[in-house]
Image: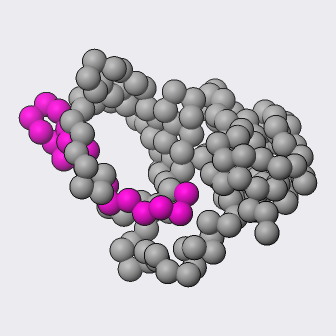
Amino acid sequence: MQLKYRNTHYDVRVEPDGEDYILTVNGEKQKFTAKRNGTNLISISNDNVKTNVYVAEDDSRFYVNIDGDGFTFEKSREEETSYGEEAKMSSDKDIIKPPMPGSIVKVLVKKGQKVEEGEGLIIIEAMKMETTLYSSIPGIVTEVNVSAGEQVDSDKVLLIVEKEK
């Protein structure tokens, strides 16, 4: 399947291999063991490292939470993949949305504040797990659309970071 994360497209395949699985991402393979611990909770082992992963999906996204870090992958079709001017322009702006519906715990930045790539922007709680959302680009916070305690859906734009011109 084709997935997109932070303006990068990935070809992802998961195939059974006996009692294990092979994950292939853009041609790179990784073997792992998985055990389902509920509807959306999976325990994954790889080289004797065990990790609990929460996975949910809707029509257009996969929501993945690994040890408190949340990731939202957009489902895409191959014909929608763009590597031209449009993709280049979109890397000038980071639109932060929650990985799943939840409650805003804390907003870590203010409008007009400079942030670095990888800097924490907001903390959200969903399914009794807190997740920090990070900036994927260095820039200026141009919009903050939420405050602590607010309930949000997964399509809500929480804040926007734009590269300095």
Residue extending farthest left: 18
Q: Main secondary structure of the magenta part?
A: strand
Q: Is residue 12 visible?
A: yes
Residue extending farthest front: 165
Q: Is residue 73 above or below residue 133?
A: below
Q: Is residue 145 visible?
A: no
Relative horizontal placement of residue 94, taking residue 57 as reference (left or right):
right
Relative horizontal placement of residue 84, taking residue 152 as reference (left or right):
left
- Quadrant where the image shows the C terminus: bottom right
Q: Magenta stretch?
A: 6-23
Q: Where does the image place residue 74, in percent across and percent down from the top left?
A: 50, 60
Q: Is residue 163 above or below residue 132?
A: below
Is residue 8 found inside the magenta-colored segment of the image?
yes
Residue at image position (42%, 26%) is: 52
Q: Where does the image place residue 123, in percent across and percent down from the top left?
A: 73, 36
Residue extending farthest top: 48
Residue at image position (78%, 33%) is: 105
Residue at image position (66%, 47%) is: 117
Is residue 21 found inside the magenta-colored segment of the image?
yes
Q: Where does the image place residue 109, in percent across and percent down from the top left?
A: 84, 42
Q: Nearer the viewer, residue 45 or 137?
A: 137
